[in-house]
Image (spheres, rainbow, N blue to C red):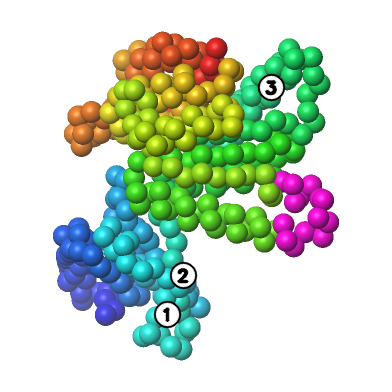
């Protein structure tokens, strides 16, 4: 129903909006545990604020590693505004690529499914890619050239195969964005890219697989539409292959024996490991395991890049200190780590901290290289 604010109804309008928002929030958080739970918000005056509230609920749960999926209403009418939320257990039900809206036959409205999303990943993907492009890939190329010279060979103009392990990949925003950028790069960056995306959370893994499938479908379509079969565009669009693995880290490295075996059986050692926003939202044992994996599986000269907030000399900016307190309140084993402790852990595992790069929102990129 539309709630229209008039000069004679300022109080009741405000009360109804607050009441509606509160009740919806309680209803959502209470009943989302049931197998199938959907909440639809119709268009009404002030729906933007209500939609924002629901989006914040979704984002909050996603940041907590939840399995909430968003379904956004695609409509020919610009005034319509709706969200549908599906509970974690509902992911076991049969899913469809599109859902018709039976109540709106005239507007031809359809609901198209999208995977889990991460607003923070969309915000930081460009700054992180800039670090990869300007600081990480040049180190790897230099290492490759030095190895070829040591063997008495000339460096290949097409680059060498690049094997990447992405730890705590989440819903896959970074996975497909970084690989698309690698596809756009000139061919001397790598002759081929094998990207292994991992996460311990089953719904995140499902989202990862969906994003990878979508990316590969687009790449295949682009290739099939190329005029020249041997064009550079075809080469660029087809050089990435993917694996998505359920990986949990502990003090001894990879917890799952089968996943450890998969990494061990790779045709070549890892060139690059990427770990974004994991170290502060996990037990310290996960960070110990991260460097254990780097020690065991990175090639000589390989890179481990981490991203997130850190303390330096025991302190940080006020916002990161407050963030640290909130993390520890949620889980005593979490928290913003001391940069010096992470650097020492790297040193113990044969990793040298080459660069510490300041990033937006008081984050840092740490670039470790294996000696």
x, y (%) of residue 43?
35, 75
x, y (%) of residue 205?
40, 48
Q: Is residue 296 above or below residue 41?
A: above
Residue under label 1, please give it.
100
Q: How many marks?
A: 3
Using the image as rendered, state which of residue 81 and residue 278 is in the foreground.
278
Using the image as rendered, state which of residue 311 and residue 37 is in the foreground.
37
Q: Quadrant of residue 178?
A: top right
Mark 1–mark 2 contact, CB under 8 Å? Answer: no
Q: Is residue 301 above or below residue 109?
A: above
Mark 3–mark 2 contact, CB under 8 Å? Answer: no
Side (left or right) of 114 relative to 190: left
x, y (%) of residue 217?
60, 59
Mark 3–mark 1 contact, CB under 8 Å? Answer: no
Disc 1/disc 2 C-alpha distance (Å) = 10 Å
Tag on residue 304?
none
Q: Is residue 230 magenta?
A: yes
Kindly tell me whether residue 20 is visible in this rendering: yes
Residue under label 2, please give it.
97
Q: Quadrant of residue 258?
A: top left
Give neighbour class at mark 3: few <14, some 14-19, many 20+ (Cα, 10 Å).
some
Residue under label 3, please give it.
144
Q: Residue at x 75, y 51 (%)?
A: 234
x, y (%) of residue 127?
54, 36
For mark 2, give the secondary structure.
loop
* First in sequence: mark 3 vs mark 2: 2
Q: Is residue 259 magenta?
A: no
In the image, the segment drawn in magenta is 223-236
Q: Nearer the viewer, mark 3 or mark 1?
A: 3
Q: Residue at x 44, y 33 (%)?
A: 261
Give neighbour class at mark 2: few <14, some 14-19, many 20+ (Cα, 10 Å).
few
């Amino acid at each position: 129903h539309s709630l229209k604010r008039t000069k004679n109804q300022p109080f009741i309008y405000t009360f109804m909006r607050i009441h509606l928002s509160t009740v919806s929030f309680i209803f959502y958080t209470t009943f989302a545990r049931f197998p199938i739970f959907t909440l639809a918000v119709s268009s009404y005056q002030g729906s933007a604020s209500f939609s924002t509230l629901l989006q914040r609920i979704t984002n909050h749960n996603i940041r907590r590693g939840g399995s909430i999926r968003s379904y956004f209403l695609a409509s020919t009418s610009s005034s319509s505004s709706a969200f549908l939320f599906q509970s974690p257990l509902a992911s076991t039900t049969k899913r469809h690529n599109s859902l018709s809206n039976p109540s709106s036959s005239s507007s031809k409205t359809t609901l198209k499914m999208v995977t889990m999303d991460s607003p923070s990943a969309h915000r930081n993907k460009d700054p992180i890619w800039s670090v990869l492009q300007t600081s990480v890939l040049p180190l790897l190329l230099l290492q490759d050239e030095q190895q070829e010279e040591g063997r008495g060979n000339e460096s290949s103009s097409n680059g060498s195969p690049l094997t990447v392990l992405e730890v705590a990949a989440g819903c896959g925003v970074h996975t497909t964005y970084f690989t698309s950028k690698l596809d756009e790069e000139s061919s001397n960056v790598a002759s081929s890219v094998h990207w292994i995306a991992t996460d311990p959370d089953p719904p995140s893994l499902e989202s990862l697989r969906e994003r990878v499938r979508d990316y590969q479908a687009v790449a295949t379509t682009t290739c099939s539409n190329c005029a020249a079969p041997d064009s550079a565009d075809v080469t660029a669009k087809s050089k990435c292959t993917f694996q998505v693995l359920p990986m949990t880290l502990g003090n001894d490295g990879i917890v799952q024996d089968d996943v450890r075996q998969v990494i061990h059986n790779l045709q070549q050692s890892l060139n690059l490991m990427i770990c974004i926003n994991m170290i502060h939202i996990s037990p310290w044992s996960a960070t110990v395991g991260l460097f254990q994996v780097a020690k065991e599986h990175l090639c000589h000269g390989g890179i481990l890049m981490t991203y997130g907030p850190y303390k330096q000399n025991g302190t940080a900016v006020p916002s990161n200190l407050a963030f640290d307190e909130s993390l520890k309140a949620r889980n005593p084993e979490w928290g913003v780590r001391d940069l010096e402790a992470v650097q020492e852990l790297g040193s113990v595992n044969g990793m040298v901290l080459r660069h510490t790069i300041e990033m937006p929102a008081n984050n840092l990129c740490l670039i470790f290289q294996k000696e």
